[in-house]
């Protein structure tokens, strides 16, 4: 049986929580997230909001050796609104 190496990461307000894993070839994003334990350490995460190297994918997507799986947190504020507020503050 061959294995692939992947990393699963979650960006936090202050830093990153990440885990390097070795999984059987043919594993999915869902498999990597479950094996990482990040869902248990950070309650309330939407484990369906995932991506590989910044590109949104479905949890059933197959992984390749060296992939970085990213768990996405919900946005605190709409990016357009954040830009508007910064522009008003600068004025």
Image: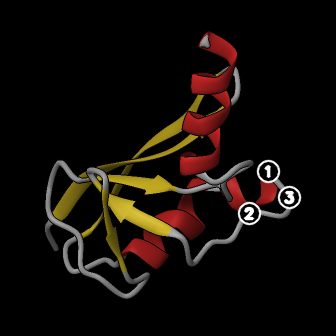
* Alpha carbon separation for disc pair 1 and 2: 6 Å
Residue for point 19% across, 73% down: 25
Which residue appears at 39% of the width and 72% of the height?
A: 29
Q: Which residue is mark 1?
A: 42
- Residue 7 is situated, as x and y percent measured from the top left of the image, at 37, 45
Q: Which residue is mark 2?
A: 45
* Total marks in image: 3
Separation (CA) of disc 2 from disc 3: 6 Å
Farthest top residue in view:
90
Q: Are marks 1 and 2 in contact (CB under 8 Å)?
A: yes
The colour style of the image is secondary structure
Q: Residue furthest bottom?
A: 60
Front-lying residue, 41 or 54 = 54
Tell me where residue 16 appears, x and y as whole percent.
57, 29
Q: Quadrant of the N terminus?
A: bottom left
Q: Residue at x 79, y 49 (%)?
A: 41
Q: Seen in the image, is 1 located left or right of residue 39?
A: left
19 lies left or right of 22: right
Q: Choose top left, top right, bottom left or bottom right for residue 11.
A: top right
Q: Are marks 3 and 1 in contact (CB under 8 Å)?
A: yes
- Which residue is under mark 3? 43
Task: Find the residue positioned furthest to the front.
Answer: 91
Question: Compared with residue 3, is residue 85 higher up or lower down, i.e. above or below?
Answer: above
Q: Is residue 15 above or below residue 25?
A: above
Label 1 residue SS:
loop
Q: Are marks 2 and 3 in contact (CB under 8 Å)?
A: yes
Looking at the image, residue 62 lies above or below residue 72: below
- Tell me the distance, in whole angstroms, between the alpha carbons under discs 3 and 1: 4 Å
Mark 2: secondary structure: loop
Crowd band around label 3 with a 10 angstrom C-alpha radius: few (<14), some (14–19), many (20+): few
Percent x, y for residue 58? 38, 83
């Amino acid at each position: 049986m061959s294995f692939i190496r992947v990393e699963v990461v979650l960006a936090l307000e202050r830093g990153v929580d990440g885990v390097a894993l070795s999984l059987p070839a043919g594993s999915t994003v869902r498999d990597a997230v479950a094996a990482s334990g990040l869902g248990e350490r950070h309650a309330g995460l939407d484990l369906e909001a995932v991506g590989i190297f910044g590109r949104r994918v479905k949890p059933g997507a197959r992984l390749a050796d060296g992939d970085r799986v990213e768990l996405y947190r919900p946005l605190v504020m709409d990016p357009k609104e954040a830009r508007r507020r910064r522009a008003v503050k600068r004025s």
